[in-house]
Image (cartoon, coloured by chain):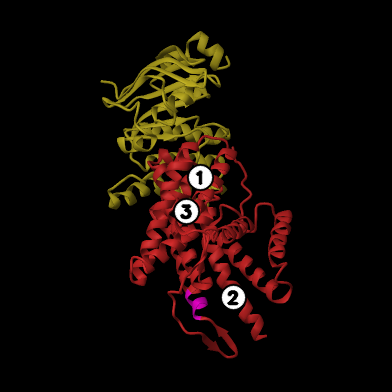
Amino acid sequence: MESIIEQFINGLRSGSIYALIALGYTMVYGIAKMINFAHGDIIMVGAYVLYVSITDLKMPVIPAVLFTIIVCAILGIVIEKVAYKPLRKAPPLAVLITAIGVSYLLQSVALLIFTANPITFKSIINLDTIKIGGITIPGITIVTLVVTSVCMIALTLFINKTKAGSAMRAVSEDKAAAQLMGINVNRTISLTFAIGSALAAVAGIMFICQFQSIKPTLGALPGIKAFVAAVLGGIGSVPGAMLGGILLGVIESLSKAYLSTELSDAIVFGVLVIVLLVKPSGLLGKNRIEKV
Amino acid sequence: MAMLKIEDLNVYYGVIQALKGISFEVNEGEVIALIGANGAGKTTILHTITGLIGAKSGHVLFEGKDLTKTPAHKIVTMGMAHVPEGRRIFSELTVYENLKMGAYTRKDKGEIESTLNKIYNRFPRLRERKNQIAGTLSGGEQQMLAMGRALMSQPRIILMDEPSMGLSPLFVSEIFDIIREISESGTTVLLVEQNAKKALSIATRAYVLETGKIVLEGKASELLNDDSVKKAYLGE
């Protein structure tokens, strides 16, 4: 019994990281109607930036974390302005291919600077393992759960309670009507990319504190799984991304522990296939009905 | 001086010319109707005025300022609101949130509430449904919301695109009553309508459009009695 609970909590940990990344996919999709396949690589950039700022720039932990988040947010804005904005009116396929191109570009630049050799990273989180009853929870797990929960609550409040958040929802629904309200659509899109990339940076930091190794392709697998999570929850839906991420993490963790380590990814993707067969818009996705 | 002056506007969709040298004026306090068949260019005119599409040549002058190159999101701050065709309310936001979006650019926070109150008084149904998701409103209520949302910016001129489209006859009359009230409260109105009879009945002057050109203009009361207008647009 204890072991099931421990595996479940493990799943919550990785799931909450997937959820943070999935939020970036889903928010960008909601606003720009595109899948930003370079999103996963922001995680990798975040990991290297944190590493460099702590090891080479000798920054203390908190400033280093903030610096990493800011660098990634700016990178997200720059990528949108340089690569995606000129393609606003282009066919979706052109945008998709560009996003894949940006993904490879980021990986190649990292490869040039840091080579393909993994860098060992000593976790910045030093919290002791906690025992409750017979259940052991590693410190990193607790920190991850707290940090990701705070991020998700803050984001939900931002989107639903602030003026900028309402503007974001308005732009994602109808750009022309939003402009007529006086909303600067370009600025709103930039803000969305900044927030999505900042969340990816946080996810990246949590990720490397867990796995303590950094390489240029680090973001690929969590990126694609988070994309799956976003689709599972219903792409475009913010609560959907959170639910999808956490579900995916828990399913993955439990199937690794009790079914098969090798097949765990297949099981995760299998769940996606089944959900999409039953509900093509995803768990919390909206079936948009066009009203005339 | 005219409040809104359109000068020799030429607009293209790709190679197709949608507006062919359109010129007209709207004076302060007037209700101007643009009437014409589907595809005559009525909506295109409004979209060009508020910057949603660009003109190849020509000018849009509002209170003496040239708006031709002004981006769409800056128009509302100049005192011009546009109620687009098909209402285009934010269907996933609540009624209240939609109205607040209308005041997005206003800096006078304290007075937004009082404008909101006025709008709730003018549209009591919106007050009753303020926390309802806007997409669940009926067509007529959505039109009221679209108008209320535009009025939240306290515009000096309001552009309305087919406000009666798709509404039941009862709602159509109500919407036209509201347009008259908006005009009487001091807001200039530029109205695009396919329901020419209703539009001419509340307008001061009107312009008749055919395939991107103005073919007729005059006092609304005169156009109502014009034989060619009667035949083509009033179904008489």
Residue situated in front as seen by the camera: B144 or A100: A100
- Are labels 1 and 3 assigned to the same chain? yes
Q: Is residue B208 left or right of residue A255?
A: left
Depth check: give the residue in front, A73 or A122: A122
Q: Which residue is drawn at 51% across and 42% down?
A: B142
Q: Kindly report which numbered mark, 1 or 3, lies closer to the viewer in this rendering.
A: 3
Disc 3 marks a residue whose amino acid type is Leu
Image point (44%, 62%), residue name: A48
Position in image of residue B91 (x %, y %): 53, 47
Question: Quick check: marks 2 and 3 in contact, CB under 8 Å?
Answer: no
Element type where label 2 sits in the image = helix
In this rendering, does residue A67 appear at all? yes
Q: Residue at x 63, y 81 (%)?
A: A5
- Magenta stretch: give its range: A139-143
Instruction: Assign the magenta stretch its main secondary structure.
Output: helix
Q: Could you tell me which chain the residue with mark 3 belongs to? A: A
Co-location on one chain, circles 1 and 2: yes
Residue placed most toward the observer, A170 or A203? A203
Give the residue type at disc 1.
Ala
Chain A color in figure: red
Rendering coords of residue A37 (x, y %): 55, 50
Mark earlier in primary sequence (1, 3): 1
Residue shown at the point (68%, 64%) measured from the top left: A265
Query: Image height check: is B167 above or below A223?
Result: above
Q: Which of marks 1 and 2 is in front?
A: 2
Q: How far apart are marks 2 and 3 (CA)?
A: 34 Å
Secondary structure under badge 3?
helix
* Distance in Å between CA atoms under marks 1 and 3: 31 Å
Q: How many labels does the image show?
A: 3
Pointer 2 residue: A10
Quarter-of-image position of residue B123: top left
The chain identifier of the residue carrying mark 2 reads A
